[in-house]
């Protein structure tokens, strides 16, 4: 006898189809939406959808454009500073704080701000220099010198110059551009920090100096670039006195460009007179025993207590002499493993650091695997205006030894109180 199976009922078939649809539709619908955007003319795409996509893109920015502009701007400004050193009398003036200012400071600041204004016209800028000393009859001679430098300094790459917006239009426009760096800073919005020549005395003596640029967003440093014309291109050259003395205008001996983007690591590349050179990642050198460290500090005793630094080194068992260098070149040097520690110790209670002296270097060291804090172990706070008024001193070191260095710093400084 043949036994027939009971036929599938309509109700059971309906349930099966619904289950199948539930499993397929979640993946099918997004594909149908994407297909419709390609098939329909752009005018047929709802405006609301387009705006939502644009907002999402802005929120997830990788800062690629900001980094590209910053690298080119610093590289072009560095060309100007090299030209000043090799071909011009240094033309120093005296600011109210008695530190020398050169025509290179004004020219480099003008070029960098011009590039930022062209690409990011709504961003604020905190910069060290102001143009008052270049205005009027008393500033005419220096003004004309700076203007001639600014208008004739270009990268040998048309596409790069197009990105930067070309040259400054006039001497008067140049003065106004220099004064665009008058933002008071703070913890809200996009703010660039510029030091056109960090380590002016090093620049004047043919030593280390840096062209520095950093972008802060809501007080956090997101992009940092340092142009160090007198450091060797090679990351493997050890840190020692007189490093970079063979720097010249020849390609390959033209210095180094350090950069970092938050969360994306740190890199270095050779400086060039044209477009950007190939970059490669840099890292802090592994340091198992802090006694083996090479540490660097400021040349000027007025910037950092060299006596305290020697006492701290002794407490840590470090027997090597310190390497004294001007500028944020110290940050770049330890970030790429040429050195290990950077100590900047307060010389007096009322001394306040400026944000443009540390923003770029702080990010580059941290992205290279290091830690940067003040002498109490607190992160540097860039949200309080043009200065780091809540921080005293700077300690930069590999993460695994940073706490030991801070402990020694506190013991030495605490014994003085």
Image (tube, rainbow, N blue to C red):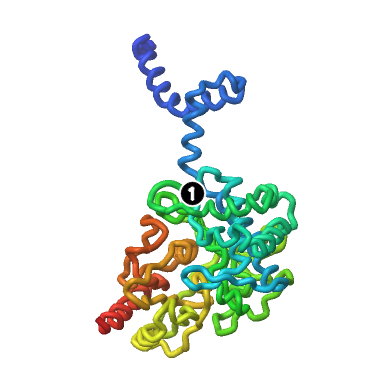
| Residue 359 spot, x, y in % from top left | 46, 62
Would residue 3 be seen by someone viewing this image from the given angle? no
Q: Which is nearer the eye, 111 or 90? A: 90
Q: Find numbered disc 1 in the image and state the secondary structure of the residue it sits on.
A: strand
| Residue 129 spot, x, y in % from top left | 53, 61
Residue in the picture at 67% in, 72% down: 85
Q: Which is nearer the eye, 336 or 361? A: 361
Q: Which is nearer the eye, 123 or 110? A: 110
Q: Does 2 sit above or below residue 313?
A: above
Residue 409 horizontal side relative to residue 154, left or right? left
* Residue farthest toward the bottom in the current orientation of the protein: 319
The quadrant the N terminus occupies is: top left
Residue 151 horizontal side relative to residue 235, left or right? right
Would residue 381 be seen by someone viewing this image from the given angle? yes
The quadrant the C terminus occupies is: bottom left
Residue 158 horizontal side relative to residue 333, left or right? right
* Residue farthest toward the top in the current orientation of the protein: 10
Residue in the picture at 75% in, 57% down: 156
* Residue farthest toward the front in the current orientation of the protein: 137
Q: Which is nearer the eye, 332 or 115? A: 115
Q: Does 89 sit above or below residue 32?
A: below
| Residue 157 spot, x, y in % from top left | 74, 54
* Quarter of the figure with residue 91: bottom right
Q: Does 184 sit above or below residue 200?
A: above
* Quarter of the figure with residue 84: bottom right
Q: Report the number of discs.
A: 1
Residue bearing mark 1: 124
> Dot 1: few (<14), some (14–19), or many (≥20) neighbours within 10 Å?
many
| Residue 330 spot, x, y in % from top left | 50, 73
* Quarter of the figure with residue 209: bottom right
Residue in the picture at 30% in, 83% down: 412
């Amino acid at each position: 006898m043949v036994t027939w199976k009971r036929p599938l009922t309509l109700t059971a078939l309906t349930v099966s189809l619904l289950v199948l649809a539930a499993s397929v539709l979640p993946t099918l619908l997004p594909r149908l939406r994407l297909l419709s955007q390609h098939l329909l003319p752009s005018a047929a795409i709802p405006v609301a959808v387009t705006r939502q996509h644009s907002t999402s893109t802005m929120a997830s920015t990788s800062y690629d454009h900001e980094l590209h502009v910053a690298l080119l701007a610093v590289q072009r400004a560095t060309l100007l500073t090299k030209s000043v050193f090799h071909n011009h009398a240094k033309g120093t003036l005296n600011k109210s704080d008695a530190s020398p200012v050169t025509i290179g400071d004004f020219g480099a600041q003008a070029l960098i701000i011009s590039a930022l204004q062209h690409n990011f016209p709504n961003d604020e800028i905190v910069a060290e220099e102001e143009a008052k000393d270049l205005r009027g009859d008393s500033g005419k001679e220096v003004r004309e010198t700076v203007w001639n430098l600014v208008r004739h300094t270009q990268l040998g790459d048309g596409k790069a110059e197009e990105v930067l917006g070309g040259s400054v239009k006039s001497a008067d426009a140049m003065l106004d551009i220099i004064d665009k760096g008058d933002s008071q800073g703070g913890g809200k919005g996009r703010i660039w920090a510029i030091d056109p020549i960090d380590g002016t005395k090093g620049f004047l003596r043919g030593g280390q100096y840096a062209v520095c640029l950093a972008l802060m967003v809501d007080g956090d440093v997101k992009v940092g670039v340092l142009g160090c014309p007198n450091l060797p291109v090679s990351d493997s050259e050890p840190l020692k006195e007189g490093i970079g003395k063979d720097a010249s205008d020849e390609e390959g001996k033209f210095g180094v460009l350090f950069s970092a983007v938050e969360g994306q690591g740190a890199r270095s590349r050779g400086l060039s007179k044209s477009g950007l050179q190939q970059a490669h990642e840099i890292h802090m050198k592994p340091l198992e025993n802090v006694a083996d460290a090479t540490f660097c500090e400021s040349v000027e005793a007025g910037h950092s207590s060299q006596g305290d630094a020697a006492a701290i080194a002794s407490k840590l068992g470090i027997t090597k002499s310190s390497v004294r260098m001007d500028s944020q070149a110290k940050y770049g040097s330890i970030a790429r493993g040429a050195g290990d520690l950077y100590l900047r110790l307060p010389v007096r209670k009322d001394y306040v650091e400026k944000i443009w002296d540390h923003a770029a270097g702080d990010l580059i060291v941290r992205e290279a695997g290091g830690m940067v804090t003040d002498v109490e172990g607190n992160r540097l706070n860039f949200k309080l205006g043009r200065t780091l008024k809540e921080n005293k001193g700077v300690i930069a070191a590999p993460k695994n030894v940073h706490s030991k260095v801070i402990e020694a710093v506190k013991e030495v400084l605490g014994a003085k109180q």
